[in-house]
Amino acid sequence: MGLCSKQTQAGWKYPTTLLCIYGFFTYMRPSEPFLTPYLTGPVHNLTLEQVTNSVFPVWTYSYLAILFPVFVLTDYVRYKPVIILQGLSYIISWVLLLFARGVPAMQGLEFCYGVVTATEVAYFSYIYSVVDTEHYQKVTSYCRSITLVGFTVASVLGQLLVSLAGVSYFYLNVISLVSVSVAFLCSLVLPMPKRSMFFHQKEAGDAAGKKSTDVKPTRDNMETPQCTEPQDNRTMTEPDTENKNIETNFCKVLWLLCKDLKDCYSSSQLIYWSLWWALATAGYNQVINYVQVLWEHVEPAQNSTIYNGGVEAVSTFLGECLTFFLFIEVQNFVLI
């Protein structure tokens, strides 16, 4: 039974399924399209100016400040702990959104959400450390598409609950809290990767196996030493050796990182792609962050029924369709 369990976890389906479940529930947040009306509503009673100038900018700058340290930390701790941190940050964010009040509390919420978005790199890179390269394209499509599905389902559900059932924004946030809590539980049972891109290029068992096979049993090392002084000297120098190994490993990682950057950006096509990707990501994040403020300014939620969930559901669904058709075209091009 234990052998079957290990074989199941060693395949690509088990970690991919768990990661997709995690991705679905982290994006299944029906309250997300109604964040601004909730903050300016009777529960928090913030002004639109406070939300625009004091609350939302915290997310932008915290995300920018945390992104690079999280990137290095993700590789060092081998992805899973950072995914757990993301799930925990989701829970803290929605607990603050539900029970905390005032501008400073909402700024703390935005900082936690900055941690959430910065640690998203672990979600998208984790799967490549636990599956073989032959499955990369397949698991990439699954893990990315499930987030779009989760967001679409959440937007439709939120719009239906608000328009048809008259559910308040507070209870939409309760549903979101339950959803991210389920995602956090899923992150705890993810298999721990044995390798990473820079700090752990070889599996953990390789180093141990190499050390054990290097020392061969001989008569000299089986005999009991007559003098303990050399042993004491060796013990005293072990911390220095460990520190030197740590410094050497860190320098090696920095060298590999610089080498990868040089190799990647020696291609002009990759530079153009990276620039477009950076501009598109930054623009998309800013639009998503402030579009609800624009909607609230044009048509206040207190004066009429809003359709934020429906608009974001249609937008995400169109993105899914475009991604799917582009994937089919790329597949046909590769086959040709």
Image (cartoon, rainbow, N blue to C red):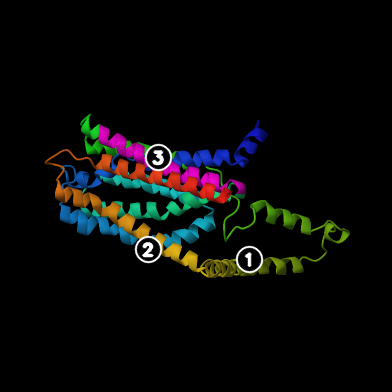
Residue drawn 53% across the image and 58% down it:
76
Whether residue 265 is situated above or below residue 311 in the rendered picture: below
Residue drawn 17% across the image and 38% down it:
305
| Disc 1 secondary structure class | helix
Query: Which amino acid type is shown beneath numbered disc 2?
Result: Ala
User: Residue 138's image quarter?
Assistant: top right
The image quadrant where one finds the N terminus is: top right
Disc 3 marks which residue?
A: 149
Mark 2 and 3 residues: CB-CB less than 8 Å, in contact?
no
Alpha-carbon span between mark 1 and mark 2 = 31 Å
Which disc, if any, is residue 242? 1
Foreground residue among 127 and 135 = 135
Q: Disc 2 vs disc 3: which is toward the camera?
A: 3
| Disc 3 secondary structure class | helix
- The spot of residue 201 in percent (x, y) is 62, 58
Q: Disc 1 vs disc 2: which is toward the camera?
A: 2
The magenta span reads 134-160
Alpha-carbon span between mark 3 and mark 1 = 48 Å
Which disc, if any, is residue 65? 2
